[in-house]
Image: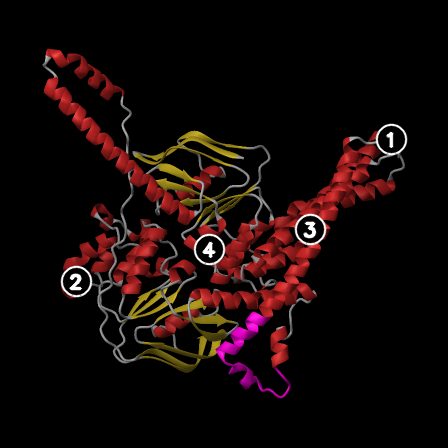
Amino acid sequence: MISINSLTVAFGGFTLLNDINFHISGADKIGLVGKNGAGKSTMLKLICGLQNPTSGKVSKTGGIKIGYLPQIMEHHRGRSVIDEAMTAFSELFEMEAELERIGQELALRTDYESKEYHDLIVKMNDLNDQLSYAQSEPPRVRCEKTLLGLGFHLDELERPTETFSQGWNMRIELAKILLSAPDVLLLDEPTNHLDIESIEWLEDYLKNYRGALVLISHDRKFLDAVTNRTVEIMLGHIHDYKVPYSKYLELRAERISQQKAAYENQQRMIEKTEEFIEKFRYKPTKSNQVQSRVKALEKLERIEVDIEDKSKLNVKFPPAPRSGDIAFKAVALKAGYKEKVVFSDADIEVRRGEKVALVGRNGEGKTTLMRIIMRELDPLGGEARTGHNVQIGYYAQNQEDILDKNDTVYETLDRIAVGDIRTKLRDILAAFLFKGEDIDKKVAVLSGGERARLAMAKLMLRPYNLLALDEPTNHMDILSKEILKQALQAYDGTLVIVSHDRAFLDGLVDKLYEFRDGKVKEHLGTVEDFLRRRKLETLNELERHFGTGKTQASAPAKTPAAAKTSSPAQKPEVQENKSEAQKDYQAKKFLSKEERKIKNRINFLEKEIEKLETAQKSIEAVLGNPGPSDDIFELTRKYLENKRDLDAKTDEWATLSEQID
């Protein structure tokens, strides 16, 4: 499909990409990895033709359709969310309009035997077949499913796009790209503005996506789940591995280890050969042997070890001063702004030494709570207070606004450092990869990843006992995130963190507060435990909406298990206070019933698929050798309809089979 041949990109005297060669085929799901600044985003721009290489070329199959999601994009205004998403079907709507025009023209014409009339019939059949093949579901339904999967609520779909943040508009653009069904998807950090549930939805979508995919992501679990091939860009060169990310790390370590061993063996052999040559160079009796070894060395293909980029963070937070037992406590907290209440009746308690994650959809109040903890925002009601001797180090998500762009890297720290720490500023900056001339760079020219590191370096200037981190890993590469995670695990203070990165949170936190529909709910356990519970609830919600055909359920439906265990006499308070064990039992019971339903559906689909395959073979046999009475147009139309139905049922069968496995 796409071939990258001898590609080089250079800026002035610096070569970013040097003689790159690789091929993208139709079944490839490629994870493009490397450090910030390695050239990953540039590679995507080269593939889709937005940037030209210094030398070399990108060859593409004719008629190939590419969908590209950049990190930064322009957003369209003046339409509702659903209307903007529906623009993905513009070609489909044009075909429908053309079909209607042909129908009107045929109704007026009477030259039934003319070539023009016959051509119109053929064109109408072709358009009918294309529409029949393309519309497995009505466009509106497909739009709704995609937008809901990416985190929108039904009542938000009619809102104008300009009333949403940049992150939410990015989701609309992503929905349009997915709905347009391109042959190749190029996604540059698609998870940066997604919450955990939306990332899981996108993960499932990309697993079943039939085209080729080239993905840049710093989410290790996302890469492992979605990709089957890893292309690493390191110091201008690429290394291609036909495996997902975690397996690539193993193979890469093995490859470099083998290279080093082979290199060392060869060097020992060369050293001994050179010693022999030097020792017997002037002895006539050994002249033939000496000449033989000299020629052997000249012909020897020298082994080279791939140069590694070993620059990495070296983070260790200062010891935390002791605080009171309660680091932060909120009772019946109501929070938001004059024009909007974001959440209410929230009871939150963070104890000394706890590591707590705030999770949920964007806009549900996670950053709002952070601002209340920092006393940047007053509650609208209830109580919120920090504990005795709590000293907070805050990492804000909007570093773009907080860091002064006119300051240099060094000045950013120097302005707020006091006391003896001023003598260690260069060491602190070096730990965050700002070395040599880097410390004199203006903040304005730093990349997203560099700004994230600089903001994190500011937290090293004082010994805090509560770290409040709002999306600290958004622009960090995978290695930097791993090192930051290890530093936070070793940190002996209290941690409150907002993050959508499952791999980063896994093993770091053991309590979560979920922000959802104006409420805040506590979840004890790991992020994986939380996701299992939420996935079951989400599947139930989607089934109610799309399964019953209703636009929105008026009240939460009970699961079959819940219906049996509740009665009219039971009060809502009693239901809310059920033990966690009983809730888990109900969930498992519901899941087993769901599994039975899924298995029955799989059996039905297998029978239908067998019937359709048999019918297709029969039609193919006739089309291969048609008789005088066979209607080719009708047979072709029937064949395409069957194929569309077969593809849809096969896709559904594959999805359901994965759920059972």
Query: What residue sits right under mark 4 in the picture?
Result: 191
Q: Secondary structure at mark 2?
A: helix
Query: Disc 1 residue type?
Result: Pro
Query: Disc 2 residue type?
Result: Ile
Q: Residue at x 34, y 50 (%)?
A: 447
- The tag earlier along the polypeptide, 2 or 3, is 3
Alpha-carbon span between mark 4 and mark 2: 37 Å
Query: What residue sits right under mark 2 in the picture?
Result: 421
Q: Quadrant of residue 556?
A: bottom right
Query: What residue sits right under mark 1 in the picture?
Result: 628
Is residue 96 among the parts visible in the rendering?
no
Alpha-carbon span between mark 2 and mark 3: 64 Å
Q: Which residues are magenta?
A: 566-589
Q: Secondary structure at mark 4?
A: loop
Q: Main secondary structure of the magenta part?
A: helix
| Viewer-nearest of discs 1 and 2 | 1
Q: Secondary structure at mark 1?
A: loop
